[in-house]
Image (cartoon, grey):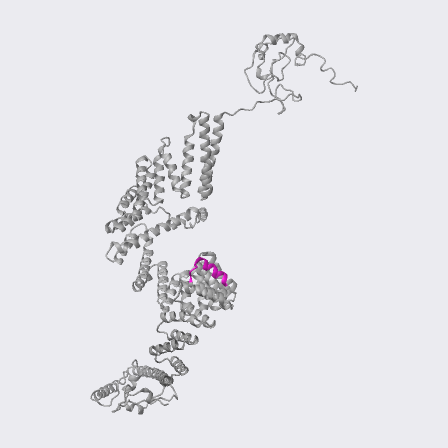
Amino acid sequence: MDDEDLYGGYNDDDSPFNTDNLTYDSQFQQAVAKTSAGRRPPPTSMRGLQTTGFNKQPVQIGKPGVPGTAMRRGTASGTGGRPMTAVVGAGFNSSKNMVAGIDPSSSITITLEPKIETEEEKIKNLEKNVSQLAEESCFAAEDNDKLAAMEKAKEAYKKERLILKQREEKNLTDQANTELTGFILLNVACQYANANNFAESLNIYNILTKNKIFQLTGRLKTNIGNIYYEQKQYLKAIKMYRMALDQIPITNQELKLQIHRNIALSFVKMGQFADAATNYEIIFKDRPDLKTGFNLLLCYYALGDRNRMKQCFLELLKIPMKIPDDDDYQAHPTDQQANLVLEVTRDDKLRRYERKKKRQIDHCIVTAVKLIAPAIESDFATGYEFCIEQVKLSEYKDLAHDLDIQKAIVYLKAKNFNMAIETLKDFEKRDVKVASSAATNLSFLYFLENDFQNAHKYADLSLKADKYNPAALTNKGNCFFAEKEYERAKHYYEDALKIDASCVEALYNLGLAYGKIGLYEQALDQFFKLHAMQRSNTQIYAKIAEINSKKSDYDQAENWYMQALRAHPKDSELLKCIGNIYDEQGDRSQAFQYYHDAYRFDPSNLQTIEWLGTYYIDSQYPEKAVEYFEKAALGRPHQVKWHLMVASCYRKSGNYAAALEKYKQIHYRFPENTECIKFLVRICSDLGYTQEAQDYATKLKKAEKMIEVKQARISSSDKRKSIIKGRKSIFEGRKISADSQAKKSIDQDVPLLQHQESKESVTRMSSSRGGSGKKNIDLNTDDTTILENRDEEAQNVQHQDFLGHVPRPQTSKVRKNPNPVTTFDVDAADLLPD
């Protein structure tokens, strides 16, 4: 194989497709010159661009046009068969960076002149920015960020004013955007109203209403009426609302009803319930709903119209609930797909909304019944029964049991406990759920009356009906807590919390039970959980502080007391507790400050008074302590303790004359008080009043002897009572044994029983004639009466002793002394030994 190129000489011959030499082809140039493309002059806008070598026409970049005659097939002449040609390139190229007719390797650059914005376009861009600012202001107001909403609204208002000025300068006022201007002004007015700057808001609203360009003047009048309503100018508000009603078209019926509702509220604020009822009737007739019906019922109640109250209540019960029942969310026994759907929708947002709506409806009906029941009939019970019967016949029949419970609670609030208990006892024979609720309330009622036996009974009945009732478990624990069985109470509180971890009562009581047992850490845990649930409950702060104080953690106790004191700075108990903490730590000066503040807010608290008085005595200022103890004596005049403290302060301060006078007053009011007489003897001796000292010494001896006699009488009386109790038990034992024996031999000993009855009748006859027969003894009478009525021969009567070798005391009939000595005629001191 030779080295010659296989493709050599391929381009030696002229090809009809070779366009490199067309520039020098005279025939082709003449043909081009005769066409319209050849005679066309180059456009001025295309100067400087690259042209072809045929007729120096500019190359058009990317502009499609109608092909000229030079592009028709067969117009050009040639020596051989050649395809059609074109003057201008088609513009297609394999490279994206190449433009048709332009050599990419050339250094020629294309420069396009920038587009110049007109004045109208500039203004429109500014209006877009202003509109965006106004929208941001609305979003900030929706997020309750009033400051940001106000700032953005003002900024949008200022820019919109500048745009109007520019239009006036450019004579473009005909193209002004009135909708944007109205939107900006309305937004600024709303933000001023939200910020309670009602004057500025009213000014802008007046600008909008006076300008006829803005057509929503009826809606703006409503906003103006709302501002007057907030300012409590109800007459002006009603005037604006009525003007809005006249200007709003009839097609917008919903807005008209809302305005009627605002008018009714204004009349209610003014106390004109008849006019308010008229407006509510208009709304309720067109679109009845529970809220409007309840407000109408309130107006009738204020007017005292019984018939209208009844009719309105019946109309209220006719309003459909439009909420699905709980049965619709029950699982299907066979349909698994439906069960999956129910599992998802059982607690979704819609279901939560339905529950909330159901609670609101129930609250509305129950409140209406509680309101009108005492007013529609002569007594409360009759009116309540009427309401309950009507509820049972309506769609809200499930509320009948709740209304019965509410009836009992109303009796409870009226302190009519008997009727409350009677009402709740009617639930015992009803279904399980209602019976459990009624028993729970009954247990609580008996607990309030300190009847713990019945409280236990009904708590057990409630648990028997529903063992997962946390309220019943809490009541049961409360009964044990009141009986000081804290361990058992703790057990029930823990069970209640296992069922319902959010049961506040059980959680609080469990903390108290732990504190009583001494488990302070566990008590703190319960109170901290409760604090997380109720942040604003200062009672929990006080309990946490109290537990820390028992643990001797005084810093934490003081911290929690201080937090409670911030919420209630005038609470004397909190101030006293803080003072007690400082007193425990030995800082009596700081403790005095808090006790003194507690005394300022509650000057009748005896503990505070006693501490302050003791503080001044310990500080060697007894004359200042007199002020506090005198107030205590004034508040408790029958307690000798405070009177003695006042006299003691006089004595310690050296004012013996005042002390003597005070002790004499005390002796006059409390003549048996030996301590007062002792001080009188001492002071009289110190002052040299010898005769008075002797007299008081004699009185002291008499008082002491009288006290000894009283104590002896009390001790002997206690012994006699114990003896009577023993005899009563013996008598009862005899009676029981006699009855049992009588039952065994009743058929055999009939003649004997008859003989005994005849003998007893003879005995009764003899005793009635003045004989010495036995008398029946009433064991419930006083012991002295028994001793006086006992026969002298009773001491010789032999009887069986059921108690074993217990010596039986001898008794005898009290004989009357023919010459009795009356203690009132003889001085008691003469009967006492020296």
Q: How many numbered marks does the figure carry?
A: 0
Q: Is residue 620 visible?
A: yes
Q: Quadrant of the C terminus?
A: bottom left
Foreground residue among 718 and 234: 234
Q: Is residue 305 left or right of residue 654?
A: left
Foreground residue among 598 and 757: 598
The residue at the far front in this view is: 688
Foreground residue among 34 and 157: 157
| 563 magenta-colored | yes
Residue drawn at point x = 44 percent, y = 56 percent: 536
The residue at the far right in this view is: 2
Where does residue 276 sit, x and y in percent of width and height?
Answer: 28, 45
The residue at the far left in this view is: 769
Q: Quadrant of the N terminus?
A: top right
Q: Which residues are magenta?
A: 557-571
The quarter of the picture where residue 773 lies is bottom left
| 54 magenta-colored | no
Where does residue 820 sit, x and y in percent of width and height?
Answer: 26, 90
Position of residue 327 relative to residue 511, above or below, is above
Where does residue 302 sit, x and y in percent of width and height?
Answer: 27, 51
Residue drawn at point x = 72 percent, y = 15 percent: 10
Residue drawn at point x = 47 percent, y = 42 percent: 148
Position of residue 707 relative to residue 6, above or below, is below
Q: Is residue 287 visible?
A: no
The quarter of the picture where residue 772 lies is bottom left
Most common SS among magenta residues: helix
Foreground residue among 791 and 157: 157
Where does residue 140 sit, x and y in percent of width and height?
Answer: 46, 41
Q: Is residue 773 left or right of residue 650?
A: left
Position of residue 520 relative to residue 62, above or below, is below
